[in-house]
């Protein structure tokens, strides 16, 4: 009897050991545990830390704490992103850090805070996140989590490739359109703008409107110069990345300045007004002095307060030698930090943000999708009463221009040398295009050298 009991105990112990081993194998298989990320800024097979579950197919089972960083305000982040992420992934907790003058990226990193995901533009990727060693080649994670990026318009991916590798994914775009005030066109009996109109044709419409009447200086067409410079349709760059020298005194930029900033500002009354008070948004949407205005689609999200009562849009005019070529992408991107220990969970969230499910939701709310999926595009501004009355199709006219070569000094050239100086000197009739661009290049190079010296 004693011998039989001993045998039974021995069998039970052996069975328990076998079950323990099987359980451990199953646990390792489910968590997909692998070595941590190397220093090459590419993700490991899994960067999932202890206590984080990123391996299940059910979004409700995914558990993680993710810290985001970006320029967007907290309320806007909650409205555009976090409320939908929480609905999809109820067990993911997101802490959002809003960049301010007192709370910059370098200070957050120095504090030891781990950033898992970040909002970025294509330019900020090179200006901020590459120097901070946070840029991550997403390719391995995209493959691991079976993320389909084929429905993303390729023009959005090119500007965020480094050495051929995609480092960010586009979530929304601020499309450029040409707003126009029907009341002004009706007042002067001028034909409304249309999709596919060339800049030469826009100039003819502008000439029919630009005049001084009853003490009011009407202006046919204007824009936010610095915004258009960033997305010019000929994809001209600002800096030679090999030498860090400005490249604006050349035929590419002369073409843009001749055809837009010079041609549209030859009226003496307009030049006088530009010298007395520089042209601004309010001249279109508050004072109602400008007939056509090139700007981003953001105004449409607050049309009741941002636009004249009788407004509509057309596609940005094209150059006759570049038919159907629209402006370059002006997108908001999301990246995953190379320093994050939660890369698997972060990629699941990013996969959701580029899904048709999420993109349809935000498309209805007036955020322009980077997807080519027609049903998502058709949903644009569907939550707005004006959607059926306005030319919403203008948002997707033609094809985006290829992105220019981006460098970390671009904004110095755009803001200080071109927008604040060259454009204004031309519009006020003080300088010709050649002189203005030559001066701009000299100023830009001086500013670049000063910044390099500080670093």
Image (cartoon, rainbow, N blue to C red):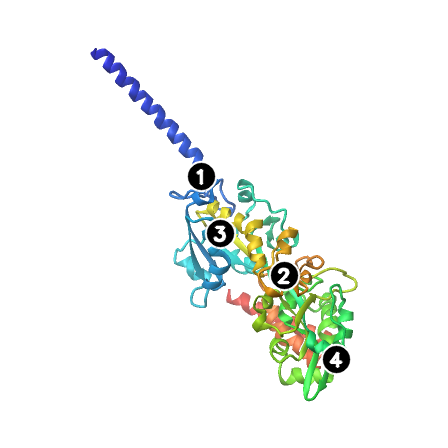
Where in the figure is residue 104, as x and y percent of width and height?
A: 45, 63
Q: Disc 3 to disc 4, how far (Cα)?
A: 55 Å
Where in the figure is residue 34, as x and y percent of width and height?
A: 45, 38
The residue to which callout 4 is attached is: 188
The residue to which callout 3 is attached is: 337
User: Could you tell me which secondary element the residue under label 3 belongs to?
Assistant: loop
Residue 122 visible within the image = no
Residue occupying the far bottom of the picture? 215
CB atoms of marks 1 and 4 within 8 Å:
no
Foreground mark, 3 or 4, reads: 4
Q: Along the polypeptide, which appears first: circle 1 or circle 4? A: 1
Residue 143 visible within the image = yes
Q: Which residue corresponds to the image point at 33% horizontal and 21% vertical from the top-left?
A: 15
The residue to which callout 2 is attached is: 243
Q: Along the polypeptide, which appears first: circle 3 or circle 1? A: 1
Q: Quadrant of residue 176?
A: bottom right
Q: Disc 3 to disc 1, how far (Cα)?
A: 17 Å
Where in the figure is residue 90, as x and y percent of width and height?
A: 43, 49
Q: Disc 1 to disc 4, how far (Cα)?
A: 71 Å
User: Could you tell me which secondary element the residue under label 2 belongs to?
Assistant: loop
């Amino acid at each position: 009897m004693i011998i039989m009991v001993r045998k039974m105990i021995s069998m039970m112990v052996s069975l328990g050991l076998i079950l323990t081993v099987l359980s451990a194998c199953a646990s390792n298989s489910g968590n997909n545990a692998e070595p941590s990320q190397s220093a090459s800024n590419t993700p490991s097979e899994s960067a999932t830390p202890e206590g984080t579950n990123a391996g299940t197919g059910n979004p409700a089972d995914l558990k993680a704490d993710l810290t985001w960083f970006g320029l967007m305000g907290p309320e806007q982040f909650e409205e555009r992103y976090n409320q939908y992420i929480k609905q999809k992934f109820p067990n993911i907790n997101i802490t959002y850090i809003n960049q301010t003058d007192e709370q910059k990226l370098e200070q957050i990193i120095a504090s030891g805070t781990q950033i898992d995901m970040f909002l970025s533009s294509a330019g900020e990727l090179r200006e901020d996140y590459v120097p901070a060693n946070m840029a991550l080649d997403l390719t391995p994670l995209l493959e691991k989590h079976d993320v389909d990026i084929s429905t993303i318009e390729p023009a959005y991916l090119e500007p965020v490739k480094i050495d051929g590798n995609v480092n960010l994914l586009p979530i929304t775009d601020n499309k450029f359109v040409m707003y126009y005030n029907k009341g002004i066109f009706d007042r002067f009996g001028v034909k409304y703008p249309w999709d596919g109109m060339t800049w030469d044709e826009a100039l003819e419409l502008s000439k029919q409107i630009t005049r001084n009447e009853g003490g009011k200086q009407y202006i046919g067409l204007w824009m936010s110069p610095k915004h258009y410079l960033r997305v010019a349709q000929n994809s001209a760059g600002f800096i030679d990345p090999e030498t860090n020298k400005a490249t604006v005194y050349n035929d590419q930029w002369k073409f843009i300045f001749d055809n837009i900033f010079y041609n549209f500002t030859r009226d003496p009354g307009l030049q006088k007004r530009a010298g007395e008070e520089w042209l601004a948004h309010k001249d279109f949407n508050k004072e109602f002095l400008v007939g056509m205005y090139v700007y981003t689609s953001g105004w449409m999200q607050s049309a009741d307060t941002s636009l004249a009562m009788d407004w509509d849009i057309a596609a940005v005019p094209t150059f006759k030698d570049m038919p159907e070529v629209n402006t370059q992408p002006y997108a908001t991107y999301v990246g995953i930090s190379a320093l994050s220990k939660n890369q698997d969970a972060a990629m699941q969230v990013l996969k959701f943000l580029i899904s048709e499910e999420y993109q349809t939701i935000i498309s209805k709310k007036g955020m322009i999708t980077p997807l080519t999926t027609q049903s998502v595009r058709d949903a644009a501004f569907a939550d707005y009463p004006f959607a059926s009355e306005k030319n919403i199709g203008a948002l997707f006219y033609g094809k985006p221009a290829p992105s220019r070569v981006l460098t970390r000094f671009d904004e110095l050239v755009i803001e200080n040398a071109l927008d604040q100086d060259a454009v204004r000197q031309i519009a006020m009739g003080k300088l010709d295009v050649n002189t203005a661009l030559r001066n701009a290049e000299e100023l830009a190079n001086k500013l670049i050298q000063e910044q390099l010296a500080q670093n």
